[in-house]
Every structure is written in structure tokens, then in C-alpha cells.
Image (cartoon, rainbow, N blue to C red):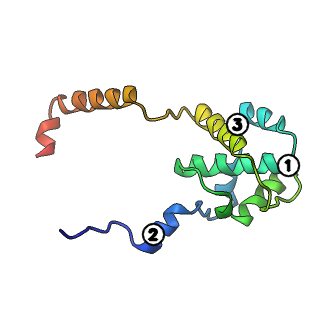
């Protein structure tokens, strides 16, 4: 059986990399922290952590995905440094995996993203059944 390719290799690589923003207007939208999160991030204690958190927050907000540190754009790190008046980001900085997990949990909690579970699967199935049973829905499917 032949395998269908939905994305080319170039498209797959682009999909797995952090998003590339067109301009500073986009960067400002994605890298502006809500005040409630901004206050928490200020307690992290250093500029590197602040920039790292802001990057993963903005990239997640744009794509609903988390990316590795090596895929971060130097243009984005400079933008955040300038925007929040921080020291320059050092891409060689190492963050403990527990720290990264804590940052990710904070972001997901703030944005209302839940982990996929059996309970959520059941809710999705029920919702799909409800949608299917609405008037005219079945006529549009076939």
C-alpha cells in the first residue's frame, strides 16, 4: 500500500521549528506577557529565565507547541531583551528540566490547556455525537 505524504520534508522541518514572525508587530503581540503572568515571571530572579519563559510563552501562544532552545530565533530574543530592558540572552544557558516543565505548566494553566486524558476523550466523543445529531448535520456529511 502506498504511503500518502501530506507534508514535504521542508514543510516538516518548518513545522518542527519555532515560528518565524514577519515583523515586530507580530512579535509584540505574541511576546507581551499578560500582567498576571508578568508579575510571576519577575520573581524568577534573572533575565535569562525571563527571556526563556517569554519565548516559550509566545511560541506556544502562536502554535500550541513547545520548542527546543536551539530553535529559538536570535531576532526574537533580542526583541524581548529590548522590549523588557533586559540583558542579552545567552543561548548557551542551560535550564533544568524541572524548571522547563514548571514553566510549561504555568503557560498551559494560564491559557486553559488541559492534558489529554480518558475524561477529555469521553467529553470529546459525547460532543461529536451531539454535533452529529443536530438537525441538518447528517445531510451535510454525505
Could you classify mark 3 by the number of other residues whose Cα lies within 10 Å: few (under 14), some (14-19), or many (20 or more)?
A: few
At numbered mark 2, what does the secondary structure look like: helix, strand or loop? helix
Asked whether the residues under the numbered discs 1 and 3 touch, taking CB atoms below 8 Å apart as contact, a structural biologist would say: no
At numbered mark 1, what does the secondary structure look like: helix, strand or loop? helix
Residue 110: % across, % down: 62, 32
Q: Is residue 29 visible?
A: no
At numbered mark 3, what does the secondary structure look like: helix, strand or loop? loop
Q: What separation in Å lies between label 1 and label 3 (alpha carbons)?
A: 18 Å
Q: Compare marks 3 and 2 and give the one earlier in the sequence.
A: 2
Tally the numbered discs.
Answer: 3
Q: Is residue 138 left or right of residue 19?
A: left
Residue 122 position (above or below residue 90): above
* Numbered badge on residue 65: none
Q: Is residue 15 visible?
A: yes
* Numbered badge on residue 47: 1
Asked whether the residues under the numbered discs 2 and 1 touch, taking CB atoms below 8 Å apart as contact, a structural biologist would say: no
Could you classify mark 2 by the number of other residues whose Cα lies within 10 Å: few (under 14), some (14-19), or many (20 or more)?
A: few
Q: Which of the 4 quarters of the picture holds residue 116? A: top left
Q: Nearer the viewer, mark 1 or mark 3?
A: 1
Amino acid at each position: 500500500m502506498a504511503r500518502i505524504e501530506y507534508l514535504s520534508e521542508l514543510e516538516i522541518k518548518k513545522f518542527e521549528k519555532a515560528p518565524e514572525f514577519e515583523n515586530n508587530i507580530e512579535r509584540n503581540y505574541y511576546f507581551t506577557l499578560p500582567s498576571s503572568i508578568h508579575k510571576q515571571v519577575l520573581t524568577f530572579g534573572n533575565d535569562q529565565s525571563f527571556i526563556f519563559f517569554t519565548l516559550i510563552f509566545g511560541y506556544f501562544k502562536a502554535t500550541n507547541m513547545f520548542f527546543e532552545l536551539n530553535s529559538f530565533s536570535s531576532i526574537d530574543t533580542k526583541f524581548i531583551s529590548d522590549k523588557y530592558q533586559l540583558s542579552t540572552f545567552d543561548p548557551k544557558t542551560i535550564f533544568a528540566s524541572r524548571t522547563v516543565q514548571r514553566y510549561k505548566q504555568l503557560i498551559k494553566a494560564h491559557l486553559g490547556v488541559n492534558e489529554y486524558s480518558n475524561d477529555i476523550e469521553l467529553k470529546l466523543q459525547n460532543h461529536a455525537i451531539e454535533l452529529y445529531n443536530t438537525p441538518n448535520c447528517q445531510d451535510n456529511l454525505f
